[in-house]
Image (cartoon, grey):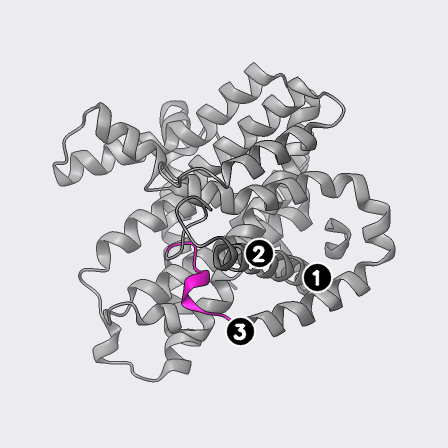
Amino acid sequence: MWYFLGTKALTQSKIMTKTNDMLKQNNRNLAIDSLKGFAIFLVCWGHSIQFLKKDANSFFDNPLFILIYSFHMPLFMMISGYLFFYSLRKDSLIGITRRRLFQLIVPSVSWFILESLLINRDINIPNIKYGAVFPFWFLSSLFMTCITMAISKFILKDSPWVFFILIFLTSLFFGDSWNMDRTKFLAPYFLLGFCAHYFMGLIERNRHWIGCISSMAWVIMLLFWDKEFYIYITKMTFHGVEFWHQLYVVVYRYAIGFFGSVSAIYLYSYTVSLRRFSLVAAYIGGYTLPIYIISTLTLWRIAGFIDVGHYLNNKIIYNLLATTLFASLIIIFCISIAAVLKKTSLTRFLFLGGR
């Protein structure tokens, strides 16, 4: 899959220098970090489309919002599964659990407690449990999928995906409480990213065929998009619903997320040759966790004070200019906050997962 990627924001020269140093020191992959930067921009862009206007739920019908939300979180989970392959090779079940707890859950709880102090929310066990799971739901879903794969590896050393698939299929017939709907939605993409390592030769030989077919399928499926395909609107469980209609919704949801993610990887590969663009995107990709958390908190809170709908009715300018600019400013703000938090080991541990 990653063979698709081939081999003047902020202060560009400074970013490039820092990015090159970061890649060398941490043995990081420029292409993957660059793709992560692109993916987190899509998250901020989608949130900006959602929150900058106060017109009920009309953002659900926004064509650009639909395009972004058809694949952006599946893409993130696919990347996560691909990278987790390396962690699983060198770490034990206990080590992975401890590491992912510190990297994903501790920052979620820390930011939730900090927000609670600022808005006078009660800090108690039920609220902390809520804060660990819901506000930054992707992180708790990622934690669950990582632990499930690690347990699967512990049980079936040579074929962990078999047990992982069994757990996933079984979960579809149980409820969606405690973020299980989002986790069930994203688990197959994590598995696809993880298993991509076993098919690298096939992917490399057929990258253009895979990319072009996926792009055509994605565009066609977008033409038939309906509100019920949003994970936020329709359940992920087969329990207590009409089976065949739910099967149609779930299969469509999985398929468009897959085709959209593969299309994004393929199309994005043509930007990797642009060295400066790739370095800026990779720099942003090194801050995905704080950008995700801080932008979520920021956009949710300032949404009550911003409504550009009174001043901007042109949908093209709103989608392609206003929200793009706002998303870029939010990313700069988040990176600036993260840079301050990285200066001390305690704040780096509590709010950045030790990154």
Q: Where does the image place residue 24, in percent across and percent down from the top left?
A: 68, 37
> Camera-side residue: 345 or 149?
149
Residue at position x 34%, y 32% in the image? 132
Closer mark to the observer between disc 3 and disc 1 = 3
* Amino acid under disc 3: Phe
Which element type, helix, strand or loop, lies under badge 1? helix
Q: Earlier in the sequence, mark 3 or mark 2?
A: 3
The residues colored magenta run 224-232
Find disc 2 in the rendering and name its residue.
Answer: 251
For the stretch drawn in magenta, what is the main secondary structure? loop
Give the side of residue 315 with respect to residue 4, left or right: left
- The disc placed on residue 266 is 1
- The disc placed on residue 154 is none
What's the CA distance linking mark 3 and mark 2? Answer: 13 Å
Residue 55 higher or lower than 117, as above or below: below
Which element type, helix, strand or loop, lies under badge 2? helix
Which element type, helix, strand or loop, lies under badge 3? loop
What's the CA distance linking mark 3 and mark 1? Answer: 22 Å
Neighbor class of circle 3 (other Cα within 10 Å; few <14, some 14-19, many 20+) is few
Q: Where does the image place residue 177, in percent across and percent down from the top left?
A: 36, 38
Give the side of residue 258 with respect to residue 298, left or right: right
Residue at position x 38%, y 32% in the image? 107
* Amino acid under disc 2: Val
Find disc 3 in the rendering and name its residue.
Answer: 224
Q: Where does the image place residue 146, in percent across and percent down from the top left?
A: 56, 31
Q: Earlier in the sequence, mark 3 or mark 1?
A: 3
- Report which quarter residue 193 is drawn in: top right
Closer mark to the observer between disc 2 and disc 1 = 2
